Image: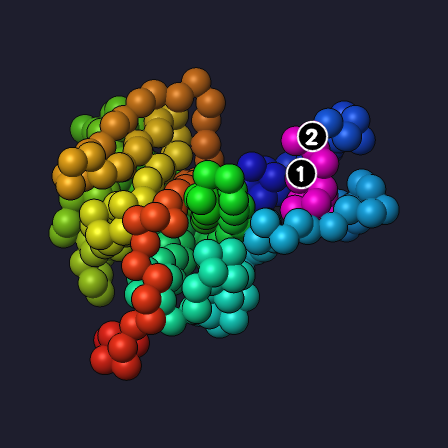
Amino acid sequence: MVDWLASLECKVFFQGHTALTAPLRYLDDSQFFNMKLGANIRINARCRSTTFQLQQVRHSDSSASLALKFLPWLADRLDATPQAVSLQDIKTCSMELFNNIRDHTQFDIGCICAQHYPRDNQVEIAIADFGLGIPNSVRKIRPEMTEDASAITEAFVLGFTTKGHPNNMGAGLPFLRDNCVGVHGSTVTVYSGYSILTHYRQNGVIQSTPQKSENFCPGTVISIILNKGSLDLSEAGLSDLDW
């Protein structure tokens, strides 16, 4: 939201952020205020071991950032190696999201953060951009889709694309859903415009639940919740890594 407002040449002020409630302490530890204001609110603010620090990543740096920073952190939290089958797939899916940011927004930068919940054996990953948002992008070629939820659902149809000269035509979001949800039993939730679309696996079948939101999400936020018990943490063979 802050980046979106700044892109519109708005001046952004923070107010009430020094109250140090639990959510504000979390944002401070995650380095949000350090990123946006140039300094932490608390002198002793430190990123927790269970948190992958909020980072802005350009597409040109995304492959190296995912491989050298994010994947080792994720592997450590899940007691696995970066070469684990599921983690390699998660890296590929995350790279696809950064490709989408490059291909479908007027900006070349996205944000990534993650949180490990040891008691629940879950990790939540969030990747966000502040582009047009999925509904507005879809409506450029499907103007009849006035409902945000319908537009987001359409973006997950294999082969659908808003690019004029596509490579891997319409493969990014379906690939994310089919691999993270269908193969690895994760939950994928998309927030964009005034809608939320959640994909989850039930009885071996991918289900989708759309819902309207009272809150507007500029751009797109995609949340991936990994359940450790559903992941294949064995090491991938060389042929898998080559692929």
Secondary structure beneath disc 1?
helix
Res 101 → quadrant: bottom left
- Which image quadrant: the N terminus? top right
Relative placement, left or right, of 195 versus 158 is: right
Instruction: Write the residue at 14% across / 39% down.
Output: 205
What is the crowding at mark 2: few (fewer than 14 residues within 10 Å), some, or many (at least 20)?
Answer: few
Q: Which residue is drawn at 73% across and 27% down?
A: 21
Query: Magenta segment, which residues?
Result: 22-34
Residue with the most extreme top position? 214
| Residue highlighted by disc 1 | 26
Disc on res. 243: none
The image quadrant that residue 135 belongs to is top left
- Give the residue type that dot 2 points to: Ala
CB-based contact (under 8 Å), mark 1 and mark 2: yes
Residue 104, position as x, y percentages in the image: 35, 52
Q: Position of residue 235 (x, y in %)?
A: 33, 71
Question: The C terminus appears in which quarter of the rendering?
Answer: bottom left
Image coordinates for residue 89, horizontal then vertical, percent: 31, 62
Between 83 and 69, the one nearer to me in the picture: 83
> Observer-nearest residue: 119 or 163?
119
In the drawing, does residue 139 fall left or right of residue 82? left
Residue 177 to residue 71: above or below: above
Residue denoted by label 2: 22
Is residue 25 found inside the magenta-colored segment of the image? yes
The residue at 15%/49% (across/down) is 158
The vertical placement of 220 against 55, above or below, is above
Identify the secondary structure beneath mark 2: helix
Going by the picture, which residue comes out furthest to the right? 43
Q: Which amino acid does label 1 sit on?
A: Tyr
Q: In this view, does 94 lie to the left or right of 180?
A: right
Q: Is the magenta stretch mostly helix, strand or loop?
A: helix
